[in-house]
Amino acid sequence: MTFSTSSRLFVLVRATGAKRVVEVGTAIGYSALWMALALPPDGRIVTIDPDRERTARARAFWKEAGVSDRIEVRNARALDELPRLDGPFDLAFIDALKPEYEGYLAATLPLLRAGGTVVVDNLLWDGRASGAVAADDASTNAIREFNRKFVKHPSLDATILSVGDGFGIGVKR
Ligand SMILES: C[S@@+](CC[C@H](N)C(=O)[O-])C[C@H]1O[C@@H](n2cnc3c(N)ncnc32)[C@H](O)[C@@H]1O
């Protein structure tokens, strides 16, 4: 996640007026921090990551930034945890294991309200998705397949912006 990706997320949260956000892949909390800063005071983020060491670091950054009360961490694998969440969410951000992107999207869509937004990072995959950079590994092939399905998903109006490492945006029908 670069500064540009996080600033895009910040603007998207503001533009959509999102109040409830779900994130797949917390890491050290950079994207969640930017989204939390964009939320209204009563806005909330649920963010999922099984890596407790990373999310402990995230919590420290959020505390320093004064946004801890807006963010709830679930230390679990997203494919296990997403079905346990209560929707509706206004915005979902997917940024974890590439071979699981299709599963994350399938588990996230029922949680998203109609008109809600799903954002997906790394869809250019450093040029590997298009084949501009040769690759034939599991993550690359998963991203290629995900992209094909994402842009013509029957439940979404979706596009992939070729900014940063590729930013998918879909609005639930
Ligand atoms: C690219 S990082 C997320 C970066 C973060 N969204 C940001 O921009 O600051 C991907 C994260 O996905 C987490 N992850 C790995 N397997 C996962 C799973 N099954 N479910 C959810 N998150 C997972 C990793 O621990 C890692 O922290």
Image (cartoon, rainbow, N blue to C red):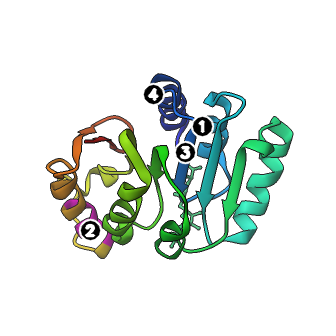
Q: Nearer the viewer, mark 3 or mark 1?
A: 3
Q: Which mark is residue 75?
A: none
**Sequence order check: which comes first, mark 2 or mark 4?**
4
Residue type at mark 2: give it: Ala
Q: Quadrant of residue 6?
A: top right
Label 2 sits on residue: 142
Label 1 sits on residue: 35
Category of crowding for the residue at label 3, using alpha-carbon neighbours closer than 10 angstroms: few (below 14), some (14–19), many (at least 20)? many
Label 3 sits on residue: 21
Query: Measuring 26% from the left and 68% from the top, which residue is drawn there?
Result: 142
**Sequence order check: which comes first, mark 2 or mark 3?**
3
Ligand 1 falls in quadrant: bottom right
Which of 144 and 77 lies nearest the eye of the viewer?
A: 77
Side of 24 where 168 appears, left or right = left
Q: CA distance from mark 1 to mark 2?
A: 27 Å
Element on which disc 2 rests:
helix
Residue type at mark 3: give it: Val
**Sequence order check: which comes first, mark 3 or mark 4?**
4
Q: Nearer the viewer, mark 1 or mark 4?
A: 4
Start and end of the magenta stretch? 139-144
Tell me if label 3 and label 1 are in contact, CB under 8 Å: yes
Q: Which mark is residue 16?
A: 4
Category of crowding for the residue at label 1, using alpha-carbon neighbours closer than 10 angstroms: few (below 14), some (14–19), many (at least 20)? many
Residue type at mark 4: give it: Thr
